[in-house]
Every structure is written in C-alpha cells, then in structure tokens.
Amino acid sequence: MTIGQAATGSLGAGRVRSGVDRVRSLFLVFVNPGAALKGALADTSPAFALAVSGAAFGLLFLQTGLDLLRADQPTLPLLGLTGPLGVASLCLIGVLYGTFGVALLGAVAFAITRPLGATLALGPTVRAIALGYSPALVYALFGVMANLLLGWNTAVAFGVTGMLWALGPTIATLRTMLAGRTGLSVILATVLGGFMLAGWAFLGT
C-alpha cells in the first residue's frame, strides 16, 4: 500500500466516523439533550445543524402533503398545485421553512436572551436551536415510513409529536444560556416552538 492510498483510506475512515458520530448525536438528544447539544456544538457546522432542522420540517410537510393527497384534497391550492407535484412542492417549502425559519428562530432566541444575561454567541445559538430538532427528524423519518408502507395519516401523530419533542432540547439550550432559569426557559421555548408550529399550520395545511 502506498502512502497516498493509506492517507486516502484514513481520510475515508475519518469521514465514516464523523458521519456515525453525527447520527449518534441525533439519538443522544432524546436521552440527554443538554449534554448532547453541548458536545455537538463543539464540532458541528452550522450547515449540518440547519440541515437537521430543514430535513425535519421537510419531512413534516411531506407527510402533510401525503395525507392531503390520500384524502383527495389540494396540497397547494393557492399555487394551483395538486397531486404529486403539489406534495413535492410542499416538501420543498418545508425544507426552506425549516432551514431559514429556524435560523431566524435562533436569531430571535439570541436577541431575547442577550439582555437577560445569556453569553452564547449568535452562531452557536442558531446551531443549538437547529440541532434541537433532532427528535423531530427521527419522528418524521418513522412517520414517512408508516405513511408510505402502512397507508397511515401521520402528519399529526408523528410529525407534530416530533415537533413537540423538540421543545425538550430547546428548553435545555435556553436553560444553559440563561444560567439555569428553568421557568423562563420553558416559557420562551414554548413561545418559539408555537411560532414554528403556527407557521406549519399556515403554510402546510
């Protein structure tokens, strides 16, 4: 084996380990969101973090479109899109909403908590809020499988439930930012999460 081949193999193994670590971090958020998010912030890029939230909302909107399609209801009547094209368009809207909407949500969380004594910078705040949607992504993945394989309507049972699970990591993030003030963290997380769900209800249903 040449030096170049060894280096390439080492690089490939490193990428595999990195990918496995990222997937593991998604599931660790379920068990210990505070510790998982704290560890993930050290080596997680903003692009990956926002990809998590974007995929979570994209799959939520996809489930919504599939449910509407099964019920013979228009998926995007305002744009005149129905059928599979409407479902695909709704999924794309979800990805954009989950990416840019959550980035904005992180910025709002930063702006609200900064005067309250939070010391976390804007970038890490956005990353932490976005990674908090890891449970929503896992729920959404199972929801899409149940929707396609079993024919269930899953937007509420899996999609919205996953979004509610995301409140836990958001509370943990805000509690860390606010030096352990749990009550305030719960209130802020509920309000911020409510805004995201209201946006889904407006755009996707």
Image: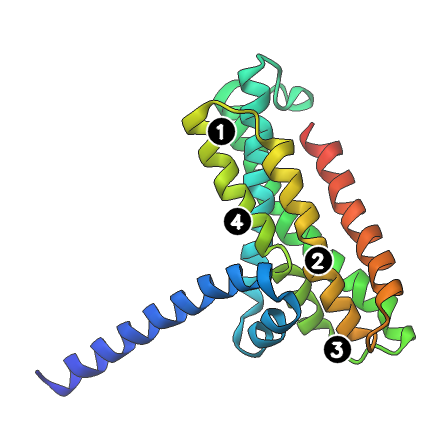
Which type of secondary structure does the marked residue at label 1 adopt? helix
According to the image, label 3 marks what residue? Answer: 120
Tag 3: Cα neighbours inside 10 Å, few (<14), some, or many (≥20)? Answer: some
Tell me the CA gap for discs 2 and 1.
25 Å
Tag 2: Cα neighbours inside 10 Å, few (<14), some, or many (≥20)? Answer: many
Tell me residue 151's x, y (percent).
47, 22
Res. 168 mark: 2
Q: Amino acid at mark 3?
A: Leu
Give the position of the C terminus as an image quadrant: top right
Tell me the CA gap for discs 2 and 3.
19 Å
Q: Relative to the observer, which residue lies in front, 122 or 155?
A: 155
Give the position of the N terminus as an image quadrant: bottom left
Residue drawn at the location 68% of the way across and 72% of the way down? 123
Q: Is residue 123 left or right of residue 110?
A: left
Res. 147 mark: 1
Residue 55 visible within the image: no
Point out the tag, 4 or 2, that comes first from the N-terminus.
4
Tell me residue 18's x, y (percent).
40, 71
Tag 1: Cα neighbours inside 10 Å, few (<14), some, or many (≥20)? Answer: some
